[in-house]
Structures are given as structure tokens and as C-alpha cells.
Amino acid sequence: MSLVQNFPFFSIIIAMFSGILSLALSGKQARNLSVAAILSVTVMSGAVMASCMGTGESYTYMMGHFPAPWGNEIRAGVLEGLTAMMFGVVMLLSVMGGLDHTYEDVEGTKLNLFFIMIDLMLSSLLALIYTNDLFTAYVFVEINTIAGCGLIMIRQKGRSLSAAIRYMIMSQLGSGLFLIGLSLLYDVTGHLLMSPAKAAVAQIEAAGVYGIPMLVILAVISVGLAIKSGLYPFHYWIPDTYGYATPTASAVLSGLVSKGYIFLLIKIFYRVLGRENVIASQIVNVLYVFGLAGMIMGSVHAIAESDTRRMIAYSSVAQIGYIYMGIGLGTQAGMVAAIFHMFTHSATKALLFISAVGLYEVSGGRKDYRSLRGAGYRAPLAGMGFAVGSLSMVGFPMLAGFISKLLFATSALQSPHKMIPTLIALAVSTTLNAIYFLRLVITLYSRGERSSRRAGSSWKLRAAVLCFILLNLALGLKSQPVVLAIENGLAMFD
């Protein structure tokens, strides 16, 4: 086994032990350790992706050298490495961009706790990406939930506390359903490792038995992870959660957490239940319908908001709807579009939340439309970042969002029965996106207090915004290698 093949395990352990060590460190030391851990994980994930692309194969890593069905396994391929690397980049830029406001929002004595939550969040996301064991996935789903709740409530303000409670209630509902599904699956198959479980499911399907239990398992797991990822109509925790957390927490929660659950669901579809069985069960049609509803209703709620942070949060409901719509198409092209949009949304939504911070800084901390008039002139780079993120969400050419919508449109052509509803929903959703995003961009560059003080944002926030802009352009202008990597990664799933 080469050194690179150990990197997925190293990544999870480094992130976890960074959180443990931070308990005994000061806030500044915990910050430095967390940034170092995120950076090292990102580099190792890129190495894993490059290695798997070179070999053309995925591989498994046995924990403690105990083979299936007793041991715990990690499985890595091109898609896992690419996803982990993208998550690492987004988390690193989110932490850097919101660092000054983290110091303002979090008490000095609790600063190390904030970075402990960041480390645990990173570790859990990596585990969801790499694990080949279903029970391990459940354990890290719970760690992810606890870390997310801690990131929300660490501000110790009324709305943050109520948002954390709502988040915890909905997350535990989703986790409970997911656990029930795993318990039923273990009862039917006798396995928790993904590969042996898939073989057992194939035998069950060939024998024509346990039809109803398998349908219940698929439905319960899908609904549980859909709740945790914020699919409409299970989205009511999102506006307060994203809107009242610290900027870094909002960027991480909106850009990464829901994508981790969706990635786990995709893995279960391919590696456990079998993609053909999932399509035959018609569950994808249910996800498709709720995805279309989320695309429209999320944008409708966003238009009605006057608080821009809640508007950005409601936009996430619509974008998650896009991802589930792609999954619901039931085609390989639709899945590729859904995964690419996971990357697009991760990078773009984090850019919007971090850029918005710079705009609020020059608007007296206010977040309503009227107060942000002319803020694009007072904070030029933040205004540019928000404009780029907004245009990407609308689907402006050369940006990542344009490629996502192009992939969704072309994948719809391969699904005749769903082509017309998909294209109509894309057109309507894009129009609604343009209404609320471009309205705010126009407000930022409308006549206002151009002569007032300019941005006092730190170099860290400006650097993060600039890097996010470049990342968005890279996904828009150089999308083909990413799409090919996704296709190769999905081929390794089967």
C-alpha cells in the first residue's frame, strides 16, 4: 500500500485530533491548529484524487486490518478525493474570510470551542465522504449535527439559540429516520459494510423477497437525509440557522453540511441499494417532485425577504432543490449535474455570505436593502464578490452557475417524461433568481452614500473573497475536467 492510500484515514484523524488538542489551547493557538489541519487535509485530498485518476481505480483501506464483514473500511476514489478537496478549500476560505467577525461574535474564553466545532465538522464531513461502513456514517452524522449546533449557538444571542434548537430538533428527526433505515437494512442483509450489503441486496432482489421492507428502507433513509440536507418542505430550520450564525458558520453550514448528507445519500444509492433498484422503486420520482417544488418555493420565499441574510439562506432551499431534481431525473447525466451543482453551490453560497459581511461593515451593520444602497462603492471588492456570486446563481455565462444549469438542461433532454417539467422549472427558477439577486446587486450600485467611509475589511476577508471569485471562474471556465472527474468517480461507485 502506498503512502497516498493512507491519506483519507490521516485526514479524518488529523481533523479529529485537532479538535481534541484544541481543548487545551488558547483561541489563537486553536485557530492556527485548525487552519493547519484544513490546509493539510485539502492537500492530501488532492493527492488522493490525483492518485486514483492515475490508477483509474478506487481502493479500500481496512481499519485495524480486520476484513469484512467485521472490520471498518474507508473507500476512496476520484470523486471522494475531489469532493474532500473542494470541501477543504471552501472551509479554509470561509474560516479565513469570517475570522475577524468570529473574534467579535464569540467570547474570548470560548474561541477555542469554536475551532473545536470547525475541526469536528471537517472530520465528520471527511468521514461521510470516505467511509465504507454504514454505522460509521451514522456516528459521524451525529458528530456533524452536534458540531453544527455548536457553531450556531456559540454567539449566545436569542435568535441564535432558538435557531440552534430548531436545527437540533429537525436534525434529530432526520437522524432518527436514517438510523431506523440502517437498522432495517442490517436486519435484512446482515451487513453494515457497503460492498457486502450491496451483494446481499442484489441476492434479495434476484430472489424476489423482502420487496416491501426494501422499499421502506429506501424511503426512510432518503427522507431522513433529505430532512437533514434541507430539502423542501423540510427547510424551515434553514433561514434562522444560516441567517443568525457567525459569517464563518453560515458559510460552512450552507456551503458544506447539507452537501455532506447528499453525498452520503448518493453513495448509499450506488454502493448499497443499487442505482437500478432505486430507480425502479420510484423514490427518485418523489425526490424529483420535491426538488422542483424547492426550486420554485425557495425563490418565492427569498423574494419576500427584506433581510438579505435570510434572503441568501432561502436561496439555499432553491439550490438544494436543484440538486435533488438532478438526482430525481434518474439518469447518469442528471447525477453528474447534481454533483457539479453541489460544488457550485458550496463555492458560491460561501462567497455570498462572506462578501455580504464586507457590505454590512460599511452599512452600519444593517442588513436590509435600503441600508445597503451604494454599499458596492463603499466596499468595492465585497461588492464585486457579491455580484459575481449573484450572477453565478442566476446562471450568467463564464460562471459556475451557468455550467450547472446547462448540465441540468442537457440532462433533462435524456429523460423524455421529465424533460418539459424540468425545463419549465429551470426557466421559472432562473427568472425568480434574477429578481431577488439582481435586485440586490442593483441596490448595491444604486446612488447612495458613495462618499462615505470605504471598507475597513481586513486583508483576510478581501483575500477570501478574491479566492472565491477565482474559484467560481475556474468552475465556470474550466468545467470540463471537473465534469470528467465526476463521471469517472461515479463509474468507480458501481
Image (cartoon, grey):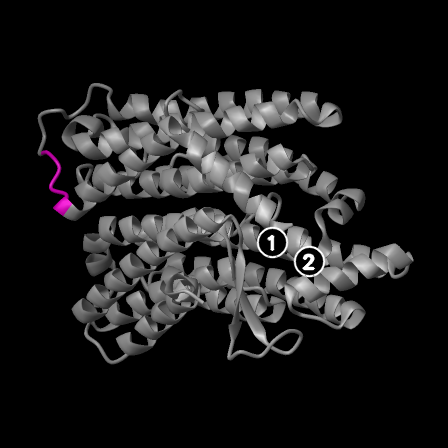
**Amino acid type of disc 1?**
Lys
**Residue visible at 10% across and 34% down in the picture:** 454
Q: Which mark is residue 272?
A: 2
Q: Tag 1 or tag 2, which sits nearer the N-term?
A: 1
Residue lying farthest right? 208
Does the magenta portion include 68?
no
Left or right of residue 186, residue 13 in this image: left
Q: CA distance from mark 2 to mark 1?
A: 7 Å
Residue 284 appears at what percent x and percent y? Answer: 71, 42
Q: Amino acid at mark 2?
A: Val
Q: Residues within 10 Å of mark 2 (few under 14, many from 20)?
A: many
Q: Is residue 90 visible?
A: yes
Residue 490 pos. (x, y %): 58, 45
Q: Main secondary structure of the magenta part?
A: loop
Mark 2 touching mark 1, by CB under 8 A? yes
Q: Quadrant location of residue 12? A: bottom left
State the residue at coordinates (75%, 45%).
276
- Up the image or down, 324 lies above or below 242; here it is above
Quadrant in which the N terminus appears: bottom left
User: For the point 62% across and 66% down, which residue is it?
Assistant: 134
Q: Which residues are magenta?
A: 454-459
The secondary element bearing badge 2 is classed as: helix
Q: Position of residue 62 (x, y in %)?
A: 53, 72
Q: Nearer the viewer, residue 24 or 56?
A: 56
Q: Is residue 17 above or below residue 432?
A: below
Q: Which residue is mark 1?
A: 267
Residue toward you, 234 or 258 = 258
